Amino acid sequence: RLGPRERRPRPLSVPGQGTRDHPPAHTALRDRLLAAVVACFKRHGAAAIDTPVLELRETLMGKYGEEAKLIYELQDQGGELLALRYDLTVPFARYLAMNKITNMKRYHIAKVYRRDNPATTRGRYREFYQCDFDIAGQFDPMIPDAECLKIVHEILSDLQLGDFLIKVNDRRILNGIFAVCGIPESKFITMCCSVDKLDKVPWEEVRSEMVGEKGLSPEAADHIGEYVQLHGGLELIEQLLQDPKLSQNKLAKEGLGDMKLLFEYLTLFGITGKISFDLSLARGLDYYTGVIFEAVLLQQENDHVEEPVSVGSVAGGGRYDGLVGMFDPKGRKVPCVGISIGIERIFSILEQRMKASGEKVRTTETQVLVATPHKHLLAARLKLISELWGAGIKAEMLYKKDPKLLKQLQYCEDMGIPLAAIVGDQELTDGVVKLRDVATRKEVDIPREKLVDEIRRRLEP
Amino acid sequence: RLGPRERRPRPLSVPGQGTRDHPPAHTALRDRLLAAVVACFKRHGAAAIDTPVLELRETLMGKYGEEAKLIYELQDQGGELLALRYDLTVPFARYLAMNKITNMKRYHIAKVYRRDNPATTRGRYREFYQCDFDIAGQFDPMIPDAECLKIVHEILSDLQLGDFLIKVNDRRILNGIFAVCGIPESKFITMCCSVDKLDKVPWEEVRSEMVGEKGLSPEAADHIGEYVQLHGGLELIEQLLQDPKLSQNKLAKEGLGDMKLLFEYLTLFGITGKISFDLSLARGLDYYTGVIFEAVLLQQENDHVEEPVSVGSVAGGGRYDGLVGMFDPKGRKVPCVGISIGIERIFSILEQRMKASGEKVRTTETQVLVATPHKHLLAARLKLISELWGAGIKAEMLYKKDPKLLKQLQYCEDMGIPLAAIVGDQELTDGVVKLRDVATRKEVDIPREKLVDEIRRRLEP
């Protein structure tokens, strides 16, 4: 009979729904990816900050519109009411307001939390990384905005993800369109939500939502439809600036003027080839006030489709000039523009590609295995490995008193360790170490005092 | 009159109690510190893993003894009951059991959460980083344990934190002591908690807790006191192995035998000078089963005190052979030993030291500011900076159409940017860029096509 201790059910050894563990191969690839993103952010002069995962609940409330229901709340265990951060933008705005900072270029790479319906096969999780770059401050129009787009362009090019397109629009242009189509201002945000669906569903569906659920007249909806299905470049901006109705709307005119300026700067950066002014781009979040953008990967050419099809958003962002003011006691505004790189989706793509190619990621960086060919040499191994560590060499040994040489060499093969440093009685007597190249199986005796230099020489790129 | 919108109180712009934002100077120093720790972990062949911040509540229950009340729980919003991880060790054990891994050397650097009484002045926060290195697997005794101590020794030496001491003990020795002093097994854990206080309070206080609160006879307490106030090296181990009572206790004998072996290996590593076998070391957590250790910094010599005094623990760890089995459906055990580097306390020390020395950390890595000496040259700046970014140079420009040269140079001084690349009409005509060394104020015209090479040459270390 089992005692009460044995009968107690063991805890489930699984992570929570929509979250996951990252094993070594995963973490090594992700670290490599994040390093490329950080390198780009640093190339553009950004400083790093960090904020807590826990925020006061009231900090997050009223910032995310309908999405607020997805915020993770902590139990009231006495003290403050807390929640897990939903993105890195609201904490950044809080940070700026709290420290009265009016001018800052920062990046922040960290996990955020959303009680979303997990779709783990499509790379959507409840805990996921965001990689944000933002520029806060009152500057001349569109210069920081253009740099944000340049950064997205650089990162997606550096990572060699295949062809991509960066869609650009402006909330002021959208709001201007809604206004000239006779929509009351109170409905602008819900209209944005409808328009935002155009990348997933056809216009007819969006139209029927506008007419059926949101109470628009069919004429108003059709009128909106004429605008939001347009996309192009500088010539479309010029055309809309001449549009008899839009050109009369102050907001739309401002937005179109800035869009023209933005394209001018992007031309100087030489990246307009991958930029599309797309009037269907709306983005869901409440806090955007000006230019908005979203980058999508296009189907690869070898997929034999006639027109490139979007396979999902990998970066997004925009201007949010009002958010910092929501945290300032006097409502002082700090204009901001920023981007967020969708690292999880990019990771999924890279992972699939590596699987397909059969390429393996090394999960450790060990350069040398310290090995012995026969028994009673643990002390010799411990002394030698200690010397190597002291010289900054990445070294391992098996945690057995008397491991078989074959097992030790097999470990090198399994882990991709390029060199083995072997000491036996003979080597100890001769004052040498047998250095073995694991790939070629060639062995050479190296005088002990020259071992570190020889290892360094062999590992030079 | 204000409208209802304006009257709504603005959200507090502060982080939660016991948590904090990390501004750029802080983050830059911390990243440097973490890089040194990661370098050491990689030198010892560890792979990185990552686990979710959110764990199932049942995963954490029954692992932390009295400390369990400090676990942050999430609100029941439907679905699973969740909590924030309390350390990185329990998630590691869950990960091993879930994936049936019996052999792994991993590191994990991430934030953990404790609803502790924050003592932010002493560097104790509710959200803080842990840096863990653990070796899981059935190996020959004390080889992985010795490597853990070697790693602590390397990290504390590399960081040049001043003199330190690593205290070592074994739970089996402590339990053996309790047994020979006539304490029932059910009281072993609470006895450990009492003994663990000896680094903060004198023996008399611990004794009166044992007698007063925990119901020990004065004789039993005194008997314990004779043992737990001992500390020393190999000679103390030998002495206790000869102790007529302890040597009769199976657990104590095992522990002392392993301790002797450990000191043998540490001698080969050449680090026994900073290791103390200290019988007062107990460590609070329930899950330790064998060797335990804790590193403390000693008061600096220039503090003019006769004997070095501990100024706080900066690393700790031990062997926990039963934890993985708690998650395995069949209770299969995977022996583990690991260390945790107290990065937050180390950070506080380094921060204070930098403040005292007046040394400033650069928060960005920008190498060149692209500047213009007069108006109407925004396009020239955008083209030049784009070239530099394309060549991998870290470059910034001010986000103004027509910034004053003085302001641009001032920005270089403020941010520690070493070079300014200046283009005016004359330079454009001549096909050159004026490269200015910010420190010496020397300017040289460089042909545009040689600019990138010249910048690289100047920035070589």
Image (cartoon, coloured by chain):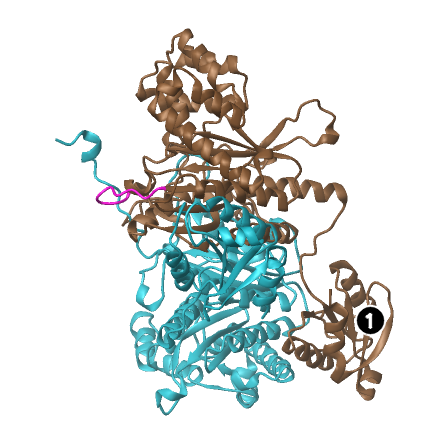
Chain colours: A brown, B cyan
- Which residue is located at x 55 percent, y 48 percent? B386
Name the secondary structure under disc 1: strand
Quadrant in the rendering for residue B271: bottom right
Three-letter amino acid code at the position of disc 1: Arg
Highlighted range, magenta: A327-335
Q: Does the magenta stretch include residue A105?
A: no
> Is A327 left, or right, of B361 in this rendering?
left
In the image shown, does B305 or A326 lie closer to the viewer?
A326
Residue B383 position (above or below residue B27): above
> Is B376 left, or right, of A164 in this rendering?
left
In the image shown, does A59 or B145 lie closer to the viewer?
A59
Quadrant in the rendering for residue A422: bottom right
Residue A347 appears at what percent x and percent y?
61, 43
Q: Chain under label 1?
A: A
Disc 1 target residue: A436
Q: Which residue lies furthest to the bottom in this view?
A: B306
Residue A18 seen by the camera? yes
Residue A261 appears at what percent x and percent y?
45, 35
Residue A150 appears at what percent x and percent y?
53, 43
Q: Quadrant of the C terminus of chain B?
A: bottom right
